[in-house]
Image: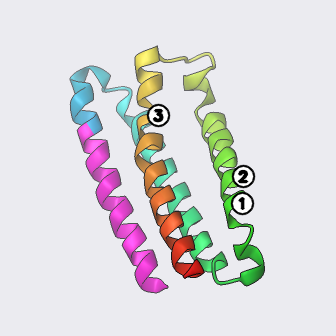
Amino acid sequence: MLRKIITYIVVFLLVGTTSFFLHQFFLGNTAVNFIPLLQKAYIFHFFFSLVLLIFFQIFCEVDKIFQQLGFIYMGVLVFKIIVFTAIFYPQLLGENMLSRYYRASLLIPVIVFLPLEVIFISKLMQSKKA
């Protein structure tokens, strides 16, 4: 189990940092004041997804909970979206609203980390069924 958790950390670090630096490169120098906000978005999704996977790794061993993990994941995904929106509300919808380009750019970390979550959780659940 520790080996899998270390694999999650390494993969998330590699993919997350590569994606962040590529994202920063494509934004260019015009977005200097946007970069700290983007960095916070990447850090939020990195830690939330990593903690989610670690909990799923632990709860996958409990037979009573294993049957409900798919439903739990959907609920946690909705919770993640709500927490992300609450944290970044001023920039997304509030008084410090960003342009549409930068608001859409804040969704890139979601697009990067969500498939990683799904891949690892589906592998975890498939290995448990087998």
Q: Is residue 100 above or below residue 52?
A: above
List x then y, in percent, for residue 82.
Answer: 68, 40
Mark 1 burial class by Cα count in 10 Å: few <14, some 14-19, many 20+:
few
User: Secondary structure beneath disc 1?
Assistant: helix
Say which mark, if any, is on residue 107.
Answer: 3
Identify which residue, 45 or 31, lies in the foreground: 45
Mark 2 vs mark 3: give the one in front: 2
Residue drawn at x 54%, y 17% is 97
Q: Which secondary structure class fits the magenta region best?
A: helix
Residue at image mark 1: 72
User: Secondary structure beneath disc 2?
Assistant: helix
Number of residue marks: 3
Identify which residue, 71 or 76, lies in the foreground: 71
Q: Residue 40 vs residue 16: left or right?
A: right
The part of the chain drawn in magenta is 1-22
| Residue type, label 1 | Ile
Identify which residue, 32 or 104, lies in the foreground: 104
Say which mark, if any, is on residue 47.
Answer: none
Q: Are marks 2 and 1 in contact (CB under 8 Å)?
A: yes
Q: Is residue 88 above or below residue 91?
A: below
Residue at image mark 2: 75
Give the mark nearest the N terminus, 3 or 1: 1
List x then y, in percent, for residue 12.
Answer: 38, 60
